[in-house]
Amino acid sequence: MARMVDVGSQPDLSLGDGKLRVSGNCILSDVHDSIFLTPSETNQGTFIGVKADHQRRSRVVFPVGKLKGLRILCLYRFKLWWMTQCMGTCGQDIPCETQFLMVEVPDSCQFGEETEGGEGLSKPVYYTVFLPILEGDFRAVLQGNAHDELQICLESGDPSVQEFEGRHLVYVAAGVDPYNVIEKSIKSLETHLKTFRHRDNKEMPDMLNWFGWCTWDAFYTDVTAEGVKKGINSLEKGGARPKFVIIDDGWQSVAMDPTSSEAKCEDSANFANRLTSIKENHKFQKDGGVGGTTDSGTGFCQIVTEIKDQFSLKYVYIWHAIVGYWGGVKPGVDEMDQYDPKIVSVVPSPGVESNGVCFVLKSIMENRVGLVNPEKVHLFYNNLHSYLASAGIDGVKVDNQSILETLGAGFGGRVKLARKYHEALETSISTNFKNNGIISCMSHSTDALYSGKKAAIIRASDDFFPRDPASHTIHIASVAYNTIFLGEFMQPDWDMFHSLHPMAEYHGAARAVGGCPIYVSDKPGNHDFDVLKKLVLPDGSTLRAKLPGRPARDCLFSDPTRDGKSLLKIWNMNDFTGVLGVFNCQGASWCQVTIKNLIHDEQPETISGTVRATDVEYLGSIAESGCPGDCVMYSHRGGKLIYVPENTSLPIQLKAREYEVFTVVPVKKLSNGAAFAAIGLINMFNSGGAIKEINYERNINLSVRGRGIFGAYSSVRPKRIIIETLEEEFDYDERSGLVTLTLRVPAEDLYQWNITIEV
């Protein structure tokens, strides 16, 4: 039997007697003789390989072994560009295009142990991850078959590329902490592949920390220079000051081929259009471009200068597709000829097609793509980005990235083409923009994920669709589960939303716990400033949580959109508090038959569940003992402060499309016998994000950002509270121990109030 060496408490992965085991517990049975293991260089996991001496093709499917009776979480691409979650218990539940698989393996070799809350017995669990990766010019992905077999699908995307080694196709690792094993796995692959970097090793753009506005859902492709100014001004007048703006699709110079037909659906772009110039179109030129004006000094340069000066904007980002525009670059145009564009066919993999071809992909397939010669793509990006940078643009949102995998025929395959484009793109970003100014979008294929060394922000799910009532709960669940995987590569972006919308608070609360940039796409004059003031401080900054927000451990294998009984809990951390969002996402899901979001339950029931302090996975890291112990939990919607003894759970009920956000804080025992916990700005969704410093020398000293009602727990009434040098009035609730006081609007941006509490 081939075995891996056990490293400390590292579970032992082994293959023998036709079984893949973790510490003696079977994961896969009836494993084929052609399958073998190769330990990783980091000794954190192992690679699944396959002996395939006589199978040399551009696409091959290998059976591995049978998976039965274990709970699984799959993250698979339901569209070419986007992943979503799927849960199951056997191999046939694994969809095509599964890029991340986690299996819950109970340790049958151990006796049951009492759970934290004393609620019955449970066995230790090993969380085992399977990560199909890139090997040479091939990309691996997982799928299941009708015999419950886990399969590896290996493809190059170019019929002429057929040679592969087959030694390092799927990385497998296991551990008792699911978040830790995933993080270590991606870092191990970073060492192995050397083609990408983990999120921890990337520069995070500063725009993440500020409130923004995007033009897309406000104007779609009808955006104009005047519309941009109206949108920013409308928000600023109401007290929600955008500090970054994304000028989305609609600014570029594009045209269709003479033989093309318009490919447009509702408010979408025309996917038959191709780029004809790197410069802005007439809508962003002086006087609308009348008379053929193309002077850059009166185009973007003038507009960007005006909005930055008038509204004190920090950053202006702009949209473009990775191939220039949706249909690529137009051949036969003088300005574009230097990039040697050629019209090429769009050929999705059979796995993508089996999951359904959406309107966007169908349109691009029908019209094909004008692809810049891969040898000229460095020049193309540099010319485009240097022009934008000269006009004052600070970064780009690069869309439609996964289309590259469909264009690999004749260029050495999908992996080689994607890597060439991403290297050129990131080189240009580094050359032309400061602070790593790029947002990756429509980029969930592993071709892109394992080829990115610098891009640090990634759109984490399909779009926010303001007029699709089925989409909103689906959106929140998809982002949360996708983040389990994507969050190891980049900081997930939960997308824009509308502040004036029936689901605005629901979306806002999710973004507050997501650790993501917070931005809206409101039409001018259509805002709910009560919602925005829970997210945005007067200076335009936000209280961003520190990590990518992920589902709580007891949600990892439950389906909060379809099973009719589960709530979705999303946790995150601040410097001195934890934050836990709870959402009822039941009632709608993606339908592969109709290829659209579908409401499957018009009246979802109220869902009951429990919350506990330890749902915030890393809460112990901010507790004095390293263990959360007794905590307080403050409910944002309920407005209640609850003292939660160690290992205690609280009941919660949420109606359809309802949410709650809890600020969770370990209780500090003071030398005088009193107990204290700082909560933060309780009028904000992420209250605890306001607390930047805290120490307990003699008195309790805090540094707090923002304005509004500051709250804390104290087991005794404070003797007095001083803000800066002045003693301030405060309220104290004897029953709950809630201390509240009001912080004024600070005169300076990012100002931190110095608060001293004597107890």
Image: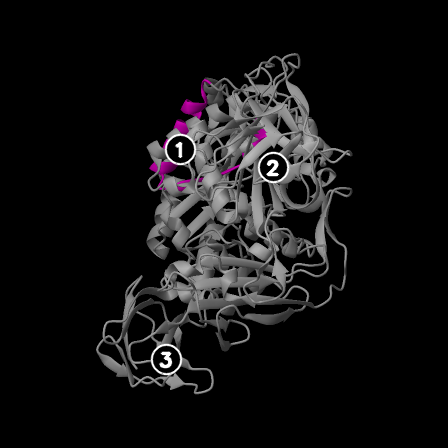
Mark 1 neighbour class, 10 Å CA radius: few under 14, some 14 to 19, many 20 or more: many
Magenta region, residue range: 375-404
- For badge 3, the amino acid type reads Leu
The residue under label 1 is 385
Contact check, label 3 and label 1, Cβ < 8 Å: no
- For badge 2, the amino acid type reads Arg
Please, which residue is most extreme toward the left here? 725
Q: Which is more toward the observer, 738 or 251?
A: 738
- Note whether residue 362 is visible: no
Q: Quadrant of the N terminus?
A: top right
Separation of disc 2 and disc 1 at Cα?
50 Å
Q: Main secondary structure of the magenta part?
A: helix
Residue shown at the point (57%, 71%) measured from the top left: 650
The residue under label 2 is 21
Determine the secondary structure under disc 2. Answer: strand
Determine the secondary structure under disc 3. Answer: strand
The residue under label 3 is 741
